[in-house]
Every structure is written in C-alpha cells, then in structure tokens.
Image: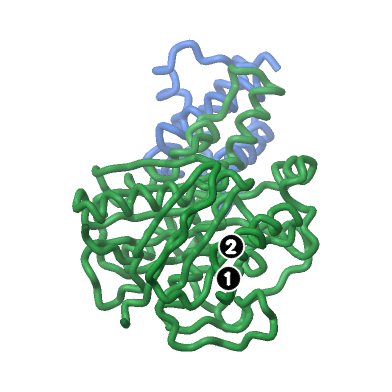
Amino acid sequence: MKDVFIIDAQQISVQNPLSHDWMEHPIAYHEPYRRAIDPDFKQYFTPNEARRYGKILKRALLTARKVMENTAINNPDAIITGTGLGCVENTELFLEALTFEGEEMLKPTHFMQSTHNTISSLIAIDAKCHGYNSTYAHKGISFECALLDAFMQLSQGEITTALVGGHDEMTPKYFSMLEKTGYLGHAKDGFSGETAVSMMLSSEKNMKAMCRIKHVEMAYGEEVNGVEGVDIDAVMIGVNGATENDAVYAHIGQNLFPEKPLLHYKHVFGESYTASGLGLYAVATCLQQQRIPAHLFVNQNQKELQGVKNILFYNQFENKNHSLILLSSCGE
Amino acid sequence: MEELILKLKKEIIEVLNLEDVKPEEIDANAPLFVDGLGLDSIDALELIVLMEKNYGIKLKDASQGKEIFKSVAVMAEYIQANRTK
C-alpha cells in the first residue's frame, strides 16, 4: 500500500476566497443563509468563460486551476468530484423554463450546465485531462465518496495523482425548500453556506505536502470502528447547531473518542452537502501549520494547540452514513 | 428599423450574458460570429431560441442561421420580415 498525501488545497466559501485567512480571522455570520465570497472572476477567466459558466463552475474551475498551478501537477491521473446538488442554479433555470415555457424553447447553456457531472468534465476539458473522471452525487457523503475513490486508487498504485473536489452552491429557492423540510435554517447558531474546495492528492511525497491521509473508512447504518494505535491530538466533527445532528456527534463522540479535544468547522464555513470537504481542508491546513487555532475548538476555553501530529475527521449524514478520515502531519 | 436594432442588441446582451458590452458598442453591421462579438455555435442556439421566444420565428433549417445571424442588422431585417409576434 502506498502512502497518500494532500499536496495542496484551495477553497471558495463564505470565508475569504483562495486564502487561509480564516485560521487567524474567521468571518463570523449570524444569519441563517450566506452565499460564498467570490473572487473577481474577471481576473481569472476570459470574457467568454466568465459569461457562460455558472457560479459553481467558476468556483470549481478556479480552485482546481490554483491547486494544479501550486503543485505543478497540470495533468492529474484522475479528476474526482463530490457534489450533493450539482449545478443547481442552472438546473433551476432549466426546469423553470421547462415548466413555464414548454420543451421547445429551452436555453442550451442552462441545459449543458444542469447536470452534476458538468463540474468534473469541465475541469478535465480545461486541463486537457483524458484520464479517470468521476462524479459522486450522494447528498451529505458525496465528498467522502470522491475522497475514498481517490484514496483507494492511489494507495493501490493504480494512479499517482488525483484532483479531488467538493462543490455545492445554494440558491435562495433551494435554501427555502430545505428550510421547509427542516434540513437547514433551524440551527440555533449555525448557518447555510456554499462549498468549493479542490485538493491535489498524490502518492509521491512532495516538500510542499500539507499532510498525509492515513485512513479512510465509510460505513452505512452502523457506527464506524474507530482508529486504534494512533495518538490522536483532536477530533474534527460536523456539529452545526441543529439539535438532531449534534446529538449524533455527542453520542458517538462519547463512545469513540472519550477525552479527545473536539474541533468544529461549520461555524466558520457553514453547512452544505459537501461542507465536509471544507472540514477536511481545515484539518489539512492545521496539520500543515502544525497548530489548531483556538476558535476551532468546541470547548471555548481551549487555547491554541501547537505541534499537532494527528487529527481524526469524523462526519455523519442523517445518522445513516458515517465516515472516519485520519490525517497526519508530514513533519513527523 | 433603428428601434428594432437597439431592442435586438439589448436582447442579445441579456440572453448571452455579455456583462461588459453596451448596446452602443455593438456595430450593427459587424459579424456576430468569430470576429465582432466573437460568438460561437452555442450562442447560435441561444439566438435561435431568442428569435422563437420573442418574435415567434421558428427556424426550420439550421443552415439558414449562417445567413440570418451574419450581423445584428441582417438579423433585424429577417425579424422584421418574418415575425409573428
């Protein structure tokens, strides 16, 4: 089995885009719904690209281009994307036109961008990558599925590099629907955000590597086993202020990780189907800098922790799908 | 005709999301494709939808598009002669 490393990761979210500023100065939000802070796309895209691509495509493409540029890996062996809703903004436009104007006057641009796999395929076209290209659209575990796919192929030596992404946009209409179902908008102190995160994985250690992925495990309908024999510094969990969701983490946390400091990230990045991509990015950034800032601790009295080596990332979706990912510092 | 040309320019800007282009910057006689606005085949499909939706013109033969979409002025002339709404 080969080692797997995260070489670089970039994000566009409700925090400052393409930046690790949130480690020092996270922007705080107190409303239930926030859209991402977009960079000035005109700096990065030709006029034709800028006018045609929807927000999620611009975000995905830009984060992907950045990690490829930073790692000098311009032609990854695999491009794997996790997305819960796909290009939902264009899907809405397409379906609205279909509903109100019939099937004969549908706009081709909305149609082309209304599928989930547009993201992965656009990145491949842009980077001229003809290798493995896949999209996982499994609601709250989409990103983990993409990561597991890449991890297995890399550790078994099938591929050497993989660009893995987690991308979701949230439109006002979709937020309103999720609010009615109770999935979003009812958390006491949480909020709905948007996710665009790309990371370059490689089985070859690079001087710039952020961290090593030691273990990826997913389980359905049963709790995960946990990780033994590793001195874990902290556990990152997906509490978001919603009672039902947080109760699962509280229960499992007590059983699986007693006495380990708990970290959270959704108070910084918000909730979305692929928010776990940002959670993993946050863990990777902590390991790269070998410190955990105080604001990431669930226990608000905890101070910044230095010299961190191992962080476990635990995510669950509706208490049915569970995943454990163990990341370790490269400085060990 | 001038009024129709201006209206058409505004509609093209909106439907093709030409954020930084103003109607007065579009030369009514300049080619729409390759040179001029630099539109492509996907834009041609958008223009076909625009003509049907806004003017009730349904292009039966796609090859007609090459002539009709030569410039905004040519497009306006075709619309003037064939519109049903």
* Left or right, residue B48 beside residue B36: right
Disc 1 with disc 2 on a shared chain: yes
Above or below B77: residue A248: below
Residue lying furthest top = B60
* Left or right, residue B82 beside residue A41: right
Q: Amino acid at mark 2?
A: Asn
* Residue A153 in sight in this render: yes
Q: CA distance from mark 1 to mark 2?
A: 6 Å
Q: Give percent across and percent down for residue A319.
A: 62, 47
* Left or right, residue A144 beside residue A106: left
- Residue in the image at 65% along x and 21% along y: B55
Above or below A139: residue A215: below
* Crowd class of label 2 (few under 14; some 14 to 19; many from 20; radius 10 Å): few
- Residue in the image at 39% along x and 61% along y: A199
* Residue B31 in sight in this render: no
Q: Secondary structure at mark 1?
A: loop
Above or below A159: residue A291: below
Count of marks overlaid on the render: 2
Q: Colour of chain A?
A: green
Quarter of the N terminus of chain A within the rendering: bottom left
Q: Give percent across and percent down for residue A126.
A: 33, 49
- Residue in the image at 57% along x and 57% along y: A275
Chain of residue at mark 1: A
Q: Amino acid at mark 1?
A: Pro
* Crowd class of label 1 (few under 14; some 14 to 19; many from 20; radius 10 Å): few
- Residue in the image at 34% along x and 61% along y: A200
| Residue occupied by mark 2 | A255
Q: Colour of chain B?
A: blue
| Residue occupied by mark 1 | A258
Which of the 4 quarters of the picture holds residue A90? top right
Quarter of the C terminus of chain A within the rendering: bottom left
Disc 1 vs disc 2: Cβ atoms closer than 8 Å?
Answer: yes
